[in-house]
Image (cartoon, grey):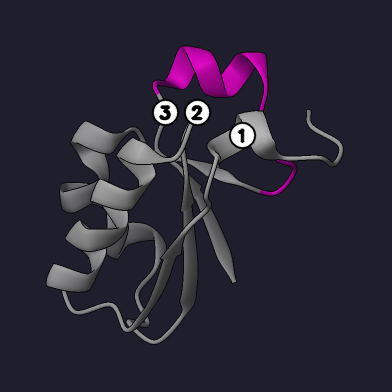
């Protein structure tokens, strides 16, 4: 499973989910293949509140990724440890 944080890099550096990968929304379409080569890999997108990550998830589906979801509520709803 791969967690993709689609917030701007500065926000990711302030607070992020351990193990997540920073890939700002405006770069995901061009960079996802470099990070996730197997299109059947489970991918969860995440942003601040959930709206941008839902758009990013749809981009990934449109690119042929088969197991993609968006974290509802974003990092603001994450009840666990952050880094």
Relative placement, left or right, of 63 versus 74 is: left
Q: Residue at x 60, y 18 (%)?
A: 13
For discs 2 and 3, the disc positioned in front in the rendered view: 2
Query: Residue visible at 52% across and 49% down?
Result: 72
Where does the magenta region start and end? 8-19
Q: Secondary structure at mark 3?
A: loop
Residue 20 as seen in the image, left or right of residue 30: right
Label 2 close to label 3 by CB (< 8 Å): yes
Tag 1 residue: 75
Which image quarter is the C terminus in? Answer: top right
Q: Which residue is mark 2?
A: 48
Residue depicted at x 75% and y 42%: 18
- Along the viewing direction, whichever of 17 and 74 lies nearer the viewer: 74
Q: Does label 2 or label 1 sit earlier along the sequence?
A: 2
- Mark linked to residue 57: none
- Observer-nearest of 47 and 24: 47
| Vertical arrangement, residue 61 with respect to residue 22, above or below | below
| Membership of 9 in magenta stretch | yes
């Amino acid at each position: 499973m791969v967690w993709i944080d689609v917030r701007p890099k500065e926000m990711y550096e302030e607070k992020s989910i351990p193990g997540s990968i920073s890939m700002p929304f405006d770069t995901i379409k061009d960079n996802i293949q470099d990070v996730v080569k197997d299109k059947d890999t489970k991918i969860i997108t995440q942003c601040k509140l959930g709206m941008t990550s839902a758009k990013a998830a749809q981009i990934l589906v449109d690119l042929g990724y088969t197991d993609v979801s968006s974290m509802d509520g974003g990092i603001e709803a994450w009840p666990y440890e952050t880094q």
